Amino acid sequence: MNFDLTPDQKLLESTVASFVKKEATVSRFRALRDDPVGWSKSLWKTMAELGWIGLVFPESAGGLGGSFVDVAIVLEQLGAGLVPEPFVASVLCAGTALLRLGGPEEHEAHLAPLIAGDTSLALAWAERGGRYDPTWVETTAIRNGDEYVLRGEKVFVLNGHAADTIVVSARTAGNPGDSDGISLFVLPRDTAGLRIKTIRTMDGHKAAMVSLDGVVAPASMRLGAEGAAAPVLDEIMDLGAAAACAEGLGVMRAALGMTVDYLKTREQFGLKIGTFQALQHRAVDMFVRAELAKSTSILASIKVADPDPAERRSAVSAAKVELALCGRYVTQQSIQLHGGIGITDEHDIGLYFKRMHVLNALFGDEEHHLARFAAQPSF
Amino acid sequence: MDLSFTPEQIAFRDEVRAWIREAMPPRIREKAAVDGHFEHDEIMAWHRILHAKGWVAPHWPAEWGGAGLDVTRRFILTEELELAGAPSLSPFGLMMVGPLILQFGTDAQRRRFLPKIVAGEEVWCQGYSEPNAGSDLASLKLSADPDGKGNYVLNGQKTWTTYAQYADWIFVLARTDKTAKKQSGISFFLVDMKTPGVTARPTLTTAGTPAFCDTFFENVVVPGENLVGPLHGGWTLAKALLGHERTYIAAVGMSTRVLRRVKRIAAATTERGVPLLEVPAWRSRIARLEIELLALKMTNYRALASAELGHAPGPESSILKIRGSEINQQCYELAMDLMGHDALSWHNEPGTIPEHEASVPPQFQYARAASIYGGSNEIQKNVIAKLILGLPS
Ligand SMILES: Cc1cc2nc3c(=O)[nH]c(=O)nc-3n(C[C@H](O)[C@H](O)[C@H](O)COP(=O)(O)OP(=O)(O)OC[C@H]3O[C@@H](n4cnc5c(N)ncnc54)[C@H](O)[C@@H]3O)c2cc1C
Ligand SMILES: Cc1cc2nc3c(=O)[nH]c(=O)nc-3n(C[C@H](O)[C@H](O)[C@H](O)COP(=O)(O)OP(=O)(O)OC[C@H]3O[C@@H](n4cnc5c(N)ncnc54)[C@H](O)[C@@H]3O)c2cc1C
């Protein structure tokens, strides 16, 4: 077995790390919390020029043909810097939907400008009654000749507030929970009847509540064959979950690093608090947890591309559960070991805690993935 | 031993319930129904209503405005208030400095301060922690020097002073003897926040609210009669107060309420049409926490009953602090987990998520502080190891 990164991957890792340290710092994110978009379009363009968006797509679609392991390397570093640019929402989620279900025309129209960093996208899949199940689609798309009429509501659409184009799931047949009958529609943000309400999320990011109030979409806006989108949504949920694991790993490792630094400097009782054995053992436990999360995250990064969906689901669910267990422990203890200063908004450690909680809630939480892990044939 | 209620006690509980239903103003009732965040003026309004009924200080003796209730009735009253979601009153006067003045103060101090605390006319805050004296409280530096005219002059800084921005008075630990061993040169003072030289500057918490302040003292003149207990004898008072604080920090009522919300959220949240409250995995997670809370509650009752017999809160109160904070944090965590995507919401705009969920994310944030303030959980464990288990240091 070999867990080493290739020389190219090592180079990628150090490039992203130094970019984040220079251009995409936590203090920049802090300032962007009050910005209506919450991320920077010029930085997005730079990230595209560095090839990170292209990594996700095959050369046939104008990308660089990277593996998910490459993508995870980028995400871990972005996580460490709390970089708010919409990589996961725009590139992994909406981008994958367009890649899998769209033809050359859609690739040209939507993926090319995305890879160039000129646009950003969103995927609106979640509905109130479905929690983490993308087949729970109550939104309807009723066919009327050459058009569809869409009605329904989507919640917590990541980057929905800023996306130029939103890919929306809607039911062209069947009932909520059915795998068959789900279609995806590509809607420009100014489509009539598409209402986008920006909301703040707890980690200082933004998202949107989206409602479709009689949106008229020509059949040409439907991606792929009618009613056949469920397997792609299923794959996207796994990509999102694996991405959360990679990003969360960066969050954990940064939080651990900050905490260890604090243990080495803060003095109480005339000693550096890092000399107290109770805290040394705690720091060790945090380190151990972060390493275990790293191991399952690596497995998920490899298996997320597995052609067997059961293999993919099993590994991704294991990683997401481990992320929840370890990430929660590491970031909670980070606050605890910082004492009072850890509860203040001015200190960065609280931002890592919040981001971690959001990552745990995205693309299926601990309970969801525990249940799914236990439901796989290999269990 | 008998843990069941007598018919008289049950009648008292019904009386309390009926009174709360009647006495709670509509604005407070609406917020209580969705567990909203109470503003300072709402808390004080409720304080005055409880005061008019004579129930503001169930644990104080009747001659000082206490409710004169026996221990079981006190449990009942407190629990009913908490279960009704009534605003929790500011603890610094009623739970902390009040009992301390009762125990260690002079008659003049009791007469001057206690009635105004009970009446809610003077609001207090706690000036213990300093930038370099947190867990190591005894290394505090705020100095109090005699001016030769019977006064003390205070200079220095306190930090993390909760709600100092609303307080009329602050109780502080200050160094009166710089040559003595750490613990033996500290005195306990009552300071009027309006005294020239006192400034409180609020800091934002991760929950997005300005809960605590940096409090600065610049040549603040405090009359000698505001010294409580013996000069240089403040450490004994400090420890006694922390005992009171830790009992209060068990937060059983608060966690009971959060668990009630947890069940409400679990019943209202569906996955593929099934309420989460009916899903076995979620049910057992809720049940486990409820049982842990029950164990804490009974332990808290034991501590209160022992206090009723006149025993000062001992190191056992550290058990309440450790488990109380952990369980409170777990309750909010469970609420967040149940909420799913709704938990991503932050400064909620109306209609984005159900109203009874709206205050969960910031409260979940602030709950992380429970294992830090009032003596961090690590320090509580040190206390138990040393004072109860007798382990060597
Ligand atoms: C089943 C079994 C098989 C064994 N086989 C062998 C063998 O084949 N050959 C051999 O040579 N030995 C063997 N041992 C001995 C084993 O290596 C010792 O038991 C072990 O090193 C612990 O030493 P101790 O029992 O003296 O405990 P102690 O060293 O006295 O420790 C007691 C407790 O204090 C903790 N502790 C001690 N110091 C610290 C510290 N600084 N900080 C925090 N915690 C501390 C320990 O972790 C432990 O929990 C065996 C032991 C067992 C149980
Ligand atoms: C929300 C909030 C409200 C507060 N309100 C008030 C208030 O109203 N008035 C007031 O006076 N103070 C208040 N405090 C301050 C609180 O009491 C201190 O934060 C607390 O005592 C910890 O001190 P510190 O923050 O300096 O952390 P530190 O003492 O620096 O501790 C940092 C970490 O090291 C650990 N540690 C320190 N020493 C040891 C040891 N010997 N063994 C093991 N672990 C150790 C701690 O447990 C902690 O995890 C408040 C704090 C918070 C968070």
Image (tube, coloured by chain):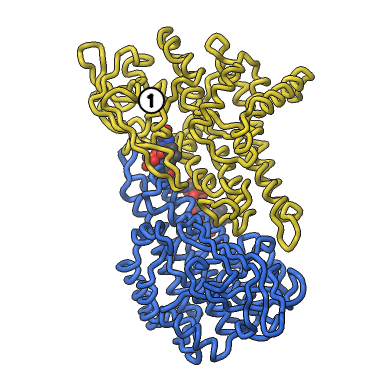
- What hue represents chain B? yellow
Q: Nearer the viewer, residue A73 or B121?
A: B121
Q: Nearer the viewer, residue A89 or B71?
A: A89
Which residue, given by chain and number where applicable, does mark 1 sit on?
A: B170
Residue A277 in sight from this viewpoint: no
Q: What chain does badge 1 belong to?
A: B
Count of residue discs? 1
Query: Quarter of the image holding residue B195?
Result: top left
Residue plotted at (60% across, 19% down): B55
Residue density around tag 1, few if under 14, some if 14–19, many if 20 or more, within 10 Å? many
Q: Nearer the viewer, residue A259 or B341?
A: B341
> Quick check: B4 left or right of A195?
right
Direction left: furthest residue: B148
- What hue represents chain A? blue
Instruction: Establish whether ligand 2 lies closer than 8 Å to the Cβ of label 1.
Output: no
Relative to A73, residue A220 above or below: below
Residue B96 at x, y = what percent? 47, 24
Q: Nearer the viewer, residue B313 or A327?
A: A327
> Quick check: A71 left or right of B296?
left
Residue plotted at (63% across, 72% down): A215
Residue B373 at x, y = what percent? 45, 37
